[in-house]
Amino acid sequence: MSRILIIEKIGSMTGDEAVAYAAKQANVDVICAYPITPQTIIVERLSEYINNGELDSAFIPVESEHSALSVSIGASLAGARVFTATASQGLALMHEIVFIAAALRCPIVMAIANRALSAPINIHADHSDVMCERDSGWIIFFAENVQEAYDLTLQAFKVGEDHNVLLPVMVNLDGFVLSHCAERVELLSDDEVAEFLPPREPIYSIDFEHPITYGPLALQNYYFEFKRQQEDAIANSVPKIEEVAKEYEKMTGRYYPMLKCYGVEDARAIVIGLGSTVGTLRAIAKRLRKTGEKVGVIGIRTFRPFPSEELIKALEGTEVVVVMDRAASLGSTGGPLYLDVAGALYGTGTQPLMLNVIYGLGGRDFTPTDAEHVFRLALKTAEKGRVEKRTLWIGVRG
Amino acid sequence: MDRCEGVMGVFIKTIKDLPREDLYIAPGHRLCAGCGPAIAIKLIAKAFRGPTVVVMNTGCVEVSTTIYPYTSWKIPWVHVAFENAAAVASGIVEAFKTIKRKYGKGVVPDVVALAGDGGTFDIGLQALSGALERGHDFVYICYDNEAYMNTGIQRSGATPRGASTTTSPAGKVIPGKLERKKDLIGIAVAHNIPYAATATISHPVDLINKVRKALEVEGPAVLHVLCPCPLGWRFDSSLTIKVARLAVETGYFPIYEVEHGRYRINIPIVKPKPLEEFIKIQGRLAHLLRPENREILERLKRDIEEQWKTLRALAKLEIE
């Protein structure tokens, strides 16, 4: 049962509990649930809220993640505000439907408690699961800590349901590191959330006066245009994400731009990462900067749409960029985030030396010592003025 | 659109009682001439009773009625993927119920999931089982043409023993599909749902009344509708209804219903016509009449006898 403690809008809760609490405050209409570690606590908490009368929502305990997202699509097309959550194999099983949810323009919010993919089976944090979905047309947020998991879940509904966007949103939180770790969280009151996030105003939803055929067959003569419209929609989300972030800042003082930059203005070396690792990197960067080392950190909060322009600007003038990937793109030329960053910078005036670090697969700890090693490596590369080995697997034996 | 009132299960007495207008589906589509499923969906839609959402699995009817920018559907229609119509329907039903309860808005429509045999017997069985177990108030209709026709006549769990398909061809060593057809209604009934029934297009009054009854019951209902396919079964496209009728009259496809666990045989076949009459006009089965294939033909006949024996026992239990 629920063990969260809330005193005067300050909560002590895990990432899963914070996401569940946000979904409850978002007053969702339909929740679809299938258990998978480390997400399960989210749907457990939500079922408690419903069964204790704290939330009026349908709770549909499906027989698989594939059906979880299928049910979510049906409910979303009917005009409901829909929430679901998954991880790892569950997301992989959903894969087929992930793309369809975006293409049918269903503003579902789905939390992903990031976990490694089998085999071998492993329940701990890495980003292999979500990276398989990066081209699916969803908006993808990454939370650095429990506070962000809560805040981004609330913002996700507002961004996704906007009529110029109308896209599903994934909120990623690192398995166990965030999903099961209790932190201090500043919460909004239910009234504040209700004001920020009124009930969904659906558009193009199922309507008996104006019937629509959803999900038709579109062949060579139309399919391409559908995809183009999806690309436009995800581009439209860029100003909306910023607008929602500003509105949220007014209420809370917490501002969530697409990139979270630290020390980049004068940095010789910048390390870029996703999720909870960004916090570790920043702590070490702060320590190093006190000793005069010019290092910076960029946390990518909005991974899709990918903040290329913002990155190019933030990386201007830096000598070395290290991209941290908690997922391997086996047989490729680098990890998934590295490829995006390298692609964004290619052909621009910003041409730092680039390193790619693969780390933390299957929940392998990324320690402060590892972080310091990464910064030292980056600074050494800056000194030498050349890259000796581009892709480094850190923290692995053999 | 108002809901028609009437005694449950007796929506129409004869075919003349049917609404002449097609309120739910337009005449135009791109299915084959003589397509059994096309006839089925036209008849099924005539039993609809007001605001209705149709959810379809991928399949012949799905691809041939919604080639963008055209659609044959005059009502909200949803296709998501091949295997998940039952799941999508679950979400639609519960969302409308919740929106009505929570905000006092909208209606709670009838939700009808339509899927072929591949999407039901095989790839969609898990989603169907989940939806039946959860007990959503919706109707699931399988239009069974006994193979994956949309991809070019591959065998499915609904293909009868002995049938020649492109993945169970009647060859020199193996004479077609060796395995027995899956018992869909048996599977549905095992979920203790309020209503399950078989029907076919040669008996439209029975079919339409069953659709109406399925809509009227509280909770999930499953209909298994046999739909001959001229292309896949290899018969002349003018013979679709005749083939369906022979399926009933030879006992090949028993017409029965199961209401809250009570079995009723709707069309008792006292003196079945010889199965050969059904087989000989179909290219997919005609090879079974050759002497070297006598064994598999006998097994097919035994399948049918066993099914009737079981059905009669179950129906008789009810009479006692």
Image (tube, coloured by chain):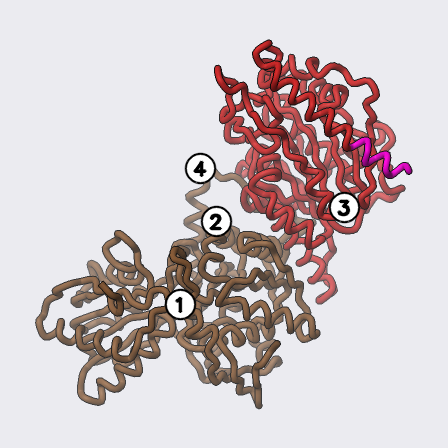
Chain colours: A brown, B red
User: Which element carries disc 3, helix, strand or loop?
Assistant: loop
Mark 2, secondary structure of its residue: helix
Crowding near the residue tagged with mark 4, few <14, some 14–19, many ≥20 C-alpha atoms within 10 Å: few
- Circle 2: is it few (<14), some (14-19), or many (20+) Cα within 10 Å? some
Mark 1 to mark 4: distance in Å? Answer: 43 Å
Instruction: Report which residue position mark 2 lands on.
Output: A96
For discs 1 and 2, the disc positioned in front in the rendered view: 1
Image coordinates of residue A223 in percent, x first then y, are 45, 42
Q: Are marks 1 and 2 on the same chain?
A: yes
- Front label number (1 vs 4): 1
What's the distance in space between the residues labelled 4 and 3, CA to CA? Answer: 34 Å
Where's residue A331, x and y in %? 26, 52
User: Horizontal and vertical percent for residue A7?
Assistant: 57, 89
Q: How many marks?
A: 4
Q: In whole angstroms, how far apart are the C-alphas of marks 1 and 2? A: 23 Å
Of badges 4 and 3, the one in the foreground is 3
- In primary-sequence order, the first of circles 1 and 2 is 2
Q: Nearer the viewer, residue A370 or B301?
A: B301
Q: Tell me, for residue A125, which label it has, or none.
A: 1
A112 horizontally vs A270: left or right: right
Q: Secondary structure at mark 4?
A: loop
Q: Is residue A118 above or below residue B231?
A: below
The chain identifier of the residue carrying mark 2 reads A
**Secondary structure character of the magenta stretch overall:** helix
Q: Is residue A165 left or right of residue A213?
A: left
Query: Over which residues does the magenta segment extend?
Result: B311-320
* For residue B277, above or below residue B318: above
Q: Amino acid at mark 3?
A: Gly
Chain for numbered disc 4 = A
Residue for badge 3: B50
